[in-house]
Image (tube, rainbow, N blue to C red):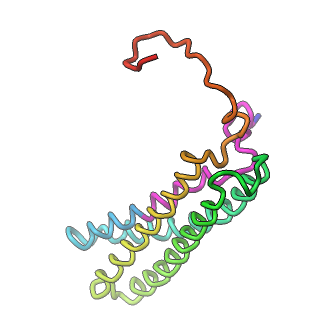
Amino acid sequence: MIETLLPGMTILKNNLHPLMIHFPIAFFVGALAMEAMAVFRDEKFHFAATWMLYLGTISALIALPTGFIAGELAAQNDPRGHSAPGHELIHVHRDWMVATTGVGILLTIYLFWINGWGKWRSQRWAFLFGLMILSALVAMGADRGGRLVFEFGTGINPEVLAKPAEEDDHHEDDGHSH
């Protein structure tokens, strides 16, 4: 039944990482955007920033272990194993995302403290700066993850990568040269 409803899940072969990674990215960057709105426009946006950070941290804590599993699956499913092109970048990506998750946890604790003690107004600039650092870490880690997939094909079925391009039967004039 899963093969019919969600054929992509079958192809992923227990690699849930691609399904999880977008949540912490969106929530962490969204928290920065909402907190900037709270600082520069209206403090009511701080509520949204708070929950985005909390959800981002929770989702990062889910995405991180799926990334460790994905790294092992990539080595197991690729006949070149740990010597596959770009494999060393998995470790660089992992380190950026471990740091990102750690900063997310620290900022969540800090935010819980400043919100609980009603100290947001006096701490808003420090918190905003922390979210800027967090978003920069997200960008660095996501960049390395994107390179893994789009530059080196990490996690892509090696049989698909080895196949020659098929002729396109698509004959409509769609603006692309064939």
**Along the viewing direction, whichever of 84 and 98 lies nearer the viewer:** 84
Q: Above or below — where is 41 with respect to 149?
A: below
Quarter where residue 122 is shown: bottom left
Image position, residue 151 (x, y; %): 55, 47
Image position, residue 112 (x, y; %): 46, 82
Report the residue that reaches farthest toward the left: 41
Residue found 60% across the figure and 60% down from its top: 89
Quarter where residue 145 is shown: bottom right
| Magenta region includes residue 16 | yes
Q: Quadrant of the N terminus?
A: top right
The image shows a total of numbered marks equal to: 0
Image position, residue 97 (x, y; %): 56, 67
Residue found 44% across the figure and 62% down from its top: 139
Query: What secondary structure prevails in the magenta region?
Result: helix
Q: Above or below — where is 144 with respect to 108?
A: above
Q: Above or below — where is 153 with respect to 20?
A: above
Left or right: where does residue 35 sit relative to residue 81? left
Boundaries of the magenta span: 2-28
Left or right: where does residue 38 sit relative to residue 111? left
Left or right: where does residue 126 sit relative to residue 141? left
| Magenta region includes residue 18 | yes
Q: Above or below — where is 149 with respect to 66?
A: above
Left or right: where does residue 174 sit relative to residue 91? left
Image position, residue 42 (x, y; %): 22, 69
**Along the viewing direction, whichever of 165 and 43 lies nearer the viewer:** 165
**Along the viewing direction, whichever of 89 and 109 lies nearer the viewer:** 89
